[in-house]
Amino acid sequence: MGLFSGLAGAISSVGSAICSGISSVCSAVGGALFTGSGGIAALATAIIGPVVASPEVALIMVAIQAVASIVCAIAESVGLKDKNETPEELGVKAQQAEKKPEDFDSTQKYIEYLRNEVELDKKQIEKLSQEEKAGYAAVGTSLYIKGIEEQYGIKAPGEFWRTAADLELGSEDVKKYMETFKEHGIKDMADMNDYLKGFAPASGVQPRQVSDCIIEGLKKIYPEMGEEGLYEKLNEMSLKVSQ
């Protein structure tokens, strides 16, 4: 099955152009980080998955930016991202770079190499089409996600970040959930996503364990809220993402 086989029949010409751009970047870079299972290609396409059928590139850009705003804020807070750096710039640099991710000990070191040693012509960014910018932005955002995963020691798939954006979670909220799940030995934030959408966690973790972690995360976010309010908030979250 190809990279985009799961999107077959539900992809617009705009979405196809963006996905092709993502595939082109990831193929050019190569290696497990970009093309392997759970790598950059899978992350980037998952981020735009819900709106990939839209014929409007602006709508897809909004979806990417909603995720990127959370991801970039976390990436800045943990030292992965420079304040003035944009995800699309990082995506372009990854395609142009001579060195590969496998040449570095961590995604953070690879990102630092792209930032400090790969020259980028700003005019090149300005000449990109909106579809190209969307593809590069999805790749750059996904690079930050991989760095965040490494720092937190927990998987955070594209679907989780889309759900975080749908819930309008702040970056500090997301960090609290990730920290709480890791503290309780749950190492894949897809479990939170699955639970809120009404599915059994794919990892095999018991749903009660997941709900307890979400409640504990909510306590950290809303320390003044009582138990009844916390469970009401959990129900509100589930209803919002399952609609």
Image (cartoon, rainbow, N blue to C red):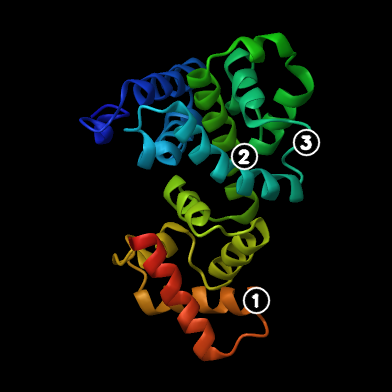
Q: Which residue is tagged 1?
A: 220
Q: Is residue 60 above or below residue 205?
A: above
Q: Position of residue 54 (x, y in %)?
A: 35, 32
- Which of 241 and 8 lies nearest the eye of the viewer? 241
- Say the numbered circle drawn on residue 82: 3
Which of marks 3 and 1 precedes in the sequence? 3
Residue 144: mark: 2
Structural distance between the alpha carbons of marks 3 and 2: 11 Å
**Amino acid on which the number 3 mark rests in the picture:** Asp
The earlier-in-sequence mark between 3 and 2 is: 3
Q: CA distance from mark 1 to mark 2?
A: 25 Å
Is residue 198 something one can see in this rendering? yes
Q: For this rendering, which residue is in front, 40 or 13?
A: 13
Crowd rating for badge 3 (residues with CA inside 10 Å; few <14, some 14–19, many 20+): few
Q: Quadrant of residue 146 in the image?
A: top right
Q: Which secondary structure lies at badge 1?
A: helix
Q: In the rendering, at what x and y percent does residue 158 appear?
A: 45, 45
Viewer-nearest of discs 1 and 2: 1
Q: Secondary structure at mark 2?
A: helix
Is disc 3 in contact with disc 2, using a CB cutoff of under 8 Å? Answer: no
